[in-house]
Amino acid sequence: MAAEESDRLQSDCDGERGGDGWSCSALSSVNCLTYDEAIIAQQDRIQQEIAGHTPLLSGRLELSVLYQEYASDDQIYQEKIKDLHRRYTFIRRTRPDGNCFYRAFGYAYLEALLDGGSELERFKEVAMQSKEELIRQGFTEFTIEDFHNTFMDLIALVEKRPAVSELLAAFNEQTISDYVVVYLRLLTSGHLQRENVFYQHFIEGGRSIKEFCQQEVEPMCKESDHIHIIALSQALNVSIQVEYMDRGEGGSTVTHVFPEGSDPQVFLLYRPGHYDILYK
């Protein structure tokens, strides 16, 4: 239905590519500007539809549910799922809204800390100090304070060692969950800018690290890549293992651990444009 609407809008905006861009027909019922606006509105409607049917984080599911997502004769994906199934037992889905990496990481790591211990104490100290570090870097305290408070509230909840269902319920509260995502984005941005000499080599398009962070890291719904994962794992000193599953050659997923050689604490599945949580 969405594709049909997009096609209709495209046909309504007939134009020719000239030296100064698209030129719309005077008889067109939708000019180029309204076409762009309509596409944005359409994307918003799709996101609202997804939100209405998909929780931010699902319950824990048998990994076998992945087999049903691909045709039985799709040998590439079926073989890679078999390989994945030999090493993992469960999966927890995240909503495909562009924030899935941060949401998946935030939940998976806090869930792993529910047993308490020294790692929780270490992480709490890092999280407490992180706000002052961001302020020293030039982030405005008034801007980040609410996000940091929500982040610390969730850590305080974990200290009480609640049932998994209680932590999951908190992450499925839109405001709480999004505030955590925002703060993790800020931590990622802060680390990238602190270590800009190193990360600048990985930025394309002639952008500075600050420009990259403003455009690709801090805004909500911006998807994440290797550079985001490396930065967040180093900012919090948390090891992340990602299984990459795509149509590349071979019958197994490609495993990356961030930082390389570390002992993973969070396990994620990446399929083009999306992250879910994996469990051994």
Image (cartoon, rainbow, N blue to C red):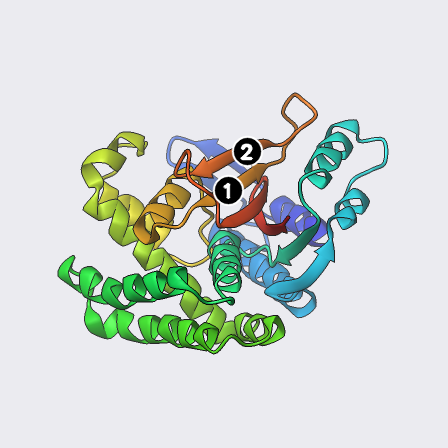
Task: Write down the residue under mark 1.
Answer: 241
Task: Give the alpha-carbon distance from disc 1 to disc 2, as whole Å.
Answer: 7 Å
Residue type highlighted by circle 1: Gln
Q: Residues within 10 Å of mark 2 (few under 14, many from 20)?
A: few
Q: Position of residue 28 (x, y in %)?
A: 58, 50
Residue 201 image point, x, y percent: 26, 30
Residue closer to the observer: 156 or 30 = 156
Q: Residue at x 68, y 60 (%)?
A: 60
Reply above or below: 102 against 157.
Answer: above
Q: Quadrant of residue 154?
A: bottom left
Residue at (43% x, 31% y) in the render: 18
Q: Are marks 1 and 2 in contact (CB under 8 Å)?
A: yes
Element marked by disc 1: strand
Residue named by callout 2? 255
**Residue 29 in sight:** yes
Residue 34 visible? The answer is no
